[in-house]
Amino acid sequence: MQQSSRDELARIFRVYGEERFSGRIADAVVDARRHGPILRTAQLRDIVKRCIPAAHANKTLARIFQALRIAVNEELTVLDRTLQAAFESLAVGGRMAVISYHSLEDRMVKHFLRDKAVSCVCPPRVPICVCGTVQYMHV
């Protein structure tokens, strides 16, 4: 992340952290890197705290560190592969339980399960199903 551009950092903070101050924080990080690398979490904490309202500090810091963790560990890619592998390993009539820890994971799991529960993807104007989609499960 030390070499990430301002736009990439803002995207990571916005998408993975759902952070509304993502651009402002990315600007502050890039500016701070001009004076030397950010080597400690305390440095990043201080950078973030200086550019946001104090009332938002704890939640914003949690979202920023979450965003960086998700990006570095490619957690959403891993979750996607894991959901697919778990689904493919289910026996007929089997059940799958998933525990999610934040809204990004929750949204991915819900969309995955919803897509597997679809019985037909034909356009609504087609009078009978011609798509041949197999409904894998009931949600």
Image (spheres, rainbow, N blue to C red):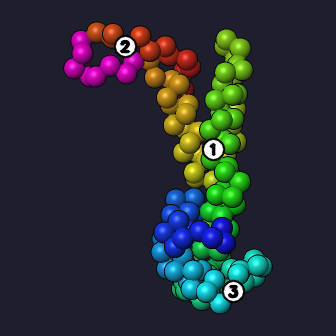
Q: Which mark is residue 24?
A: none
Find residue 107 and report its horizontal and vertical position in percent. Answer: 54, 45
Name the element at disc 1. helix
Q: Which residue is mark 2?
A: 131
Segment colored magenta: 120-127
Q: Nearer the viewer, mark 2 or mark 1?
A: 1
Q: Which residue is mark 1?
A: 77
Give whichever of discs 1 and 3 has the lower sequence position: 3
Q: Nearer the viewer, mark 1 or mark 3?
A: 3
Q: Nearer the viewer, residue 29 or 99?
A: 29
Q: Nearer the viewer, mark 3 or mark 2?
A: 3
Q: Is residue 131 left or right of residue 44?
A: left
> How many numbered markers are drawn?
3
Evaluate whether residue 138 shows in this view. Answer: yes
Q: Quadrant of residue 49?
A: bottom right
Give whichever of discs 3 and 2 has the lower sequence position: 3
Q: Residues within 10 Å of mark 1 (few under 14, many from 20)?
A: few
Q: Which residue is mark 3?
A: 36
Find residue 74 and report its horizontal and vertical position in percent. Answer: 66, 51
Q: Are marks 2 and 1 in contact (CB under 8 Å)?
A: no
Q: Is residue 121 left or right of residue 113?
A: left
Q: Residues within 10 Å of mark 2 (few under 14, many from 20)?
A: few
Evaluate whether residue 18 shows in this view. Answer: no
Q: CA distance from mark 1 to mark 3?
A: 31 Å
Name the element at disc 3. loop
Find residue 127 and report its horizontal and vertical position in percent. Answer: 24, 12
